Image (cartoon, grey):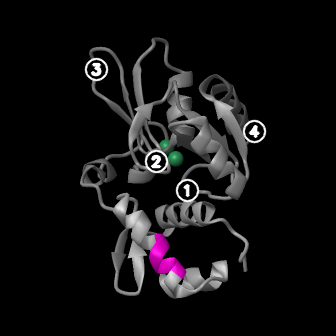
Amino acid sequence: MMSDTLPQTRRDKIVAWLAQSGTLSIEQLAQYFGVSTMTIHRDLDRLAANGLARKVRGGVIAVDDGVGDAVSRTRCALCGKRVPRRTAWIITPEGADALHACCAHCGLLLLRHAADNRVALATDFLYGRMVNAYQAVYVMDSEVGLCCVPGVLCFATSHDAERYRAGFGGRRLTYDEALPAVGDAHRHH
Ligand SMILES: [Zn+2]
Ligand SMILES: [Zn+2]
């Protein structure tokens, strides 16, 4: 029960869980947050209006943005896993084919071993938009484990990263901080 949760935090959590599970029921959410199903309905209306979720009878499902299908058939250049839409990376070396990474963990490791300054796009975890990986903000070791260990999630702004971190914990890192952090953790794993 988290009846004192702020509406914004509650909606952020719903979006994060949705990314993990793909579908949630209104009943489930109302019970977890200790609020009425009407309140959850209003949250979902708001998320749906912002394109962050799709309402279905009795619940909500993750948004299918079309781009996702193309990405999900590709495999990570580092670990070979299927690339989840929610955490996909695209790295484009000069004059070569694009590399895909399953999540920020593998994306950062690929860049760590890259000699040149290649174009790298990462998926923002909250809104699913592609952002410049070098300017993104990262949260490492939060409660949400989506792909590789240690988990690293990517955010467009430090404000978003901080909001997420307040709900789910973890360490907030810049690109320059995240790069060595993921490499060291990877080695010891
Ligand atoms: Zn990978
Ligand atoms: Zn991964």
Mark 2 within 8 Å of ligand 2, using the beta carbon: yes
Q: What residue is shown with label 4?
A: 188
The amino acid marked with disc number 2 is Thr
Identify which residue is drawn at 56% across, 80% down. Answer: 29
Sooner in the amino-acid sequence: mark 1 or mark 4: 1
Q: What residue is shown with label 3?
A: 96
Separation (CA) of disc 3 from disc 4:
31 Å
- Dominant secondary structure of the magenta stretch? helix
The amino acid marked with disc number 1 is Leu
Magenta stretch?
39-43
Mark 1 within 8 Å of ligand 2, using the beta carbon: yes
Q: Which secondary structure, mark 1? A: loop
**Residue 82 visible in the shown view:** no
- Asked whether residue 87 is drawn in magenta, I would say no
Identify which residue is drawn at 44% across, 72% down. Answer: 44
Separation (CA) of disc 3 from disc 2:
22 Å
Sooner in the amino-acid sequence: mark 3 or mark 2: 2
